[in-house]
Amino acid sequence: MTQFLRLRTLLPCLCLAAAQLASAQAQAPVTAVGAWARASVQGQRSSGAFMTLTASEPLTLVGASTPVAGLAEVHEMKMEGDVMRMRPAQALELPANKPVQLSPGGYHLMLQELKVPLKPGTTIPITLAFRTARGEQRQLALQVPVSVMAPKDVGAATMHGMHKP
Ligand SMILES: [Cu+2]
């Protein structure tokens, strides 16, 4: 009898824990427009992914993950002397309502230890990890099209996509 009562009181607690887990993985208040990943060839170890992020409240991009790469990092390009080099960025601040570009030559997502070649015309899942101003973790799961070069008319392509049935 005691066992039964314990189980009854335990169950609501489990539900609460599940709810907290769900909210910890709540969708980040941010939109990604014009996302694309650069196609890679057999044997190539790394590639990049690019997009424009607009947060609706201050957010910090703290990381990324994708099943197609062993390691996904936020990188920045920096001039060192007269040589352009890239290096991991600890975090990328996204001010509220201000588009921040991840682009070749600037901040970008570096996909390293590629497990498969990224084929043009396919899409790859990428999950972005964010931290809110209150220190909460948020995620944004994306399906990112693979392309040899940047999509030419990102705005038009997005509008077209939105009007699809
Ligand atoms: Cu890089």
Image (cartoon, grey):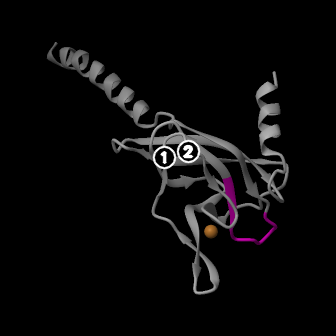
Q: Is residue 110 magenta?
A: no
Q: Is 127 or 30 nearer to us in this picture? A: 30
Q: Is 16 or 164 nearer to us in this picture? A: 164
Compared across the picture, whether 141 is left or right of 62 comes to right
Tell me residue 91's x, y (percent): 46, 59
Pointer 1: what residue?
95
Q: In this view, does 68 lie above or below 54?
A: below
Q: In this view, does 165 lie above or below 24?
A: above
Tell me residue 110's x, y (percent): 62, 63
Q: Which mark is residue 7?
A: none
Q: Is residue 43 magenta?
A: yes
The image quadrant that residue 103 belongs to is bottom right
Tell me residue 142's x, y (percent): 64, 42
Q: In percent of the image, x 58 and y 87: which residue is there?
A: 81
User: Residue flagged by tag 2: what amino acid is it?
Assistant: Lys
Q: Quadrant of ligand 1?
A: bottom right
The image quadrant that residue 163 belongs to is top right
Q: How many labels does the image show?
A: 2
Pointer 2: what residue?
98
Q: Is 12 or 151 nearer to us in this picture? A: 151
Q: In this view, does 29 lie above or below 116?
A: above
User: Residue flagged by tag 1: what amino acid is it?
Assistant: Pro
Tell me residue 139's x, y (percent): 51, 42
Q: What element carries label 2?
A: loop
Asked if the residue at label 2 sits under 8 Å from ligand 1, the reply is: no
- List the single residue furthest toward the bottom: 81
- Dot 2, how many residues are within 10 Å of its Cα: few (below 14), some (14-19), or many (20+)? some
Q: What element carries label 1?
A: loop
Compared across the picture, whether 131 is left or right of 7 comes to right
Where are the magenta residues, as a range? 40-50
